[in-house]
Image (cartoon, rainbow, N blue to C red):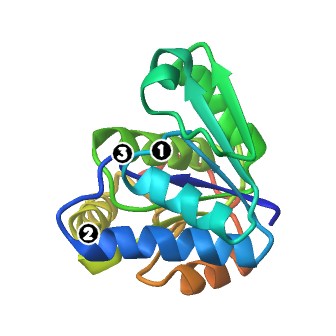
Amino acid sequence: MKRICVYCGSNTGAQPEYLESAKALGTLLAQGNIDVVYGGAEVGLMGAVASAALAEGGNVIGIIPKSFADKVCHTKLSELQIVPTMHDRKTRMFDLSDAFITLPGGIGTLEETFEILTWAQIGFHSKPCGLLNINGYFDSIIEFLDHSLRQQFVRQEHRDMVLVDNNPQGLLHQFENYQAPTIRKWIEKN
């Protein structure tokens, strides 16, 4: 993997571990010579991941919509791409990335994560996607996905696409061994 897209909050959240883990992930990626692709902001967990990677000599590519560029963009990135819309941002981040890691965040973070998982489920890509489950932040979402599986709205193979770890190194190890499912999305009744 050459580049990993990181989805995360533009706030730092209530727990200090969120910020610590964001910094640890940025550092780990830079030390592994893996470029960071992210939303281009200097604030919140987003800025922490980017700044930590840069401090380790890493390459960080920010993609930010024009409407946000003059408000929150990180000014010290290796590369900053300003795009017209949020849709352009998400497409560009996808095109540049070999895998996707989600840290804690809000509605936008979840939306980006579920969109990329949907694209994997319907066969648009076979890139690994993982949740960095810091302090159990994603426990409720994991339980919801398991509930969707039990209610036969999600196949086991597609549920298994959502890799989860509470440690960045553990998640990267799962990425190295990831095999995308080759099964159809739709569940047929017997």
Q: Amino acid at mark 2?
A: Tyr
Q: Which residue is mark 1?
A: 42
Estimate the x, y position of residue 41 in percent, counting from the top left.
49, 40
- The residue positioned 24% from the left and 61% from the top of the image is 144
Report the mark closest to the observer, 2 or 1: 1
| Residue most extreme to the left | 14
Neighbours of disc 2 within 10 Å: few (<14), some (14-19), many (20+): some
In front here: 139 or 181? 139
Mark 2 element type: loop
Neighbours of disc 1 within 10 Å: few (<14), some (14-19), many (20+): many
Estimate the x, y position of residue 127 in percent, counting from the top left.
70, 57
Q: CA distance from mark 3 to mark 2?
A: 16 Å
Mark 1 element type: loop
Q: Quadrant of the C terminus?
A: bottom left
Mark 3 element type: loop
Q: Amino acid at mark 1?
A: Glu
First reached walking from the N terminus: tag 3 or tag 1: 3
Q: Which residue is mark 2?
A: 137
Q: Which residue is mark 3?
A: 10
Q: Is residue 50 left or right of residue 153?
A: right
Estimate the x, y position of residue 80 in percent, counting from the top left.
69, 34
Determine whether 180 is above or below 81 in the image.
Answer: below
- The residue positioned 74% from the left and 64% from the top of the image is 58
Q: Is label 3 in contact with label 1 (beta carbons under 8 Å)?
A: no
Estimate the x, y position of residue 104 in percent, counting from the top left.
34, 60
Which quarter of the picture shows residue 148?
bottom left
First reached walking from the N terminus: tag 2 or tag 1: 1
The answer, for residue 101, to whether it is visible in the render is: no
The answer, for residue 45, to whether it is visible in the render is: yes
